[in-house]
Image: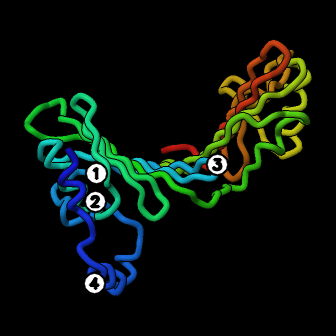
Amino acid sequence: MNSFVSCMRPPSMLMAALLLCAGSAAAGPWDPARAEALAGWSWAAPMVFDLPGAYLQVRRFRAPMAPADAARRLTRAGESRFDRLQFSGAVLSLSGLHEGRHWLAQLRPADDGGGSTVGLLSSLGPGPRREAGFDPAALAPPGARPVLRASSRMAGGAGSLASYLCPGPYPRVAAAVLRALRDWRWRPVAPADEAFGPAAGRALSAAGEWTQPDGARLTVHLHPRADAVALTFWHRTKESS
């Protein structure tokens, strides 16, 4: 089943030496959109996610050939990145490990027919944490337990998501978050009818949209549970255009 995968190994140590001597471009990250073996393929912009202790990149593509032929081309272009082939219905999957990163490609026939292929290429590996200057722990109440933290970089800017489980009743947790937001100089994003001040008799809530002078935006969600409050922060360095 995977006979064509096993034959796509680097031919010799001499070839590896030639690649090392070819310059810095050869030593850089592999970019499938620049691979000669994949000429004529269409690639979407990569989506990059910084997870705790890991770095994930996902990219969609379209190839003007059947999935089996596209898999052969991708295996050749990826050198030793793919060494396993699997089928699940109409979906063909390639996977493998290369220099500490796990690679996965999923290919299937395009819905519009024509013998073309659509697919998804992803790579996952360890990577340094990239902080954007926002520390959600500084806004969480004492005793809050971290549940989830992830960040991403898109064309519209960098963003991060953090969730906590906070013990105590909703009013106490909400008041603590509100004090922290004010201490860190976050300002509420007022609706149009409150541009000149909060509506009379309406108390300021921690939940909602907040901003800072540098354009950073923060969305705060609070959801009461039986004996705790689920707190979520969504931070963006700038608004998507």
| Quadrant of the rendered image containing residue 113 | top left
The residue labelled by disc 3 is 52
Q: Nearer the viewer, mark 2 or mark 3?
A: 3
Q: Which of 92 and 163 is in front in this view?
A: 92
The residue labelled by disc 1 is 43
N-terminal-most mark, 1 or 3: 1
The CA distance from mark 1 to mark 3 is 27 Å
N-terminal-most mark, 1 or 4: 4
**Can residue 137 be seen here?**
yes
Amino acid carrying mark 1 in the image: Trp
The CA distance from mark 1 to mark 2 is 6 Å
Tell me what residue is drawn at x 27 percent, y 47 percent: 61
Q: Are marks 2 and 3 in contact (CB under 8 Å)?
A: no
In this view, 210 is above or below 224 = below
Q: Which of marks 1 and 4 is in front?
A: 4
Residue 77 screen position, x and y as percent: 25, 62
Secondary structure of the residue carrying tag 2 is: helix
Tell me what residue is drawn at x 17 percent, y 60 percent: 39
N-terminal-most mark, 1 or 2: 2
The residue labelled by disc 2 is 33
Tell me what residue is drawn at x 79 percent, y 20 percent: 199
N-terminal-most mark, 2 or 3: 2
Residue 14 circle label: 4
N-terminal-most mark, 2 or 4: 4
**Crowding near pointer 3: few (<14 within 10 Å), some, many (20+)?**
some
Image quarter hosting the N terminus: top left
Residue 190 screen position, x and y as percent: 71, 30
Q: Which of 190 and 78 is in front in this view?
A: 78
Lateral position of residue 31 relative to residue 199, left or right:
left
Q: Which of marks 2 and 4 is in front?
A: 4
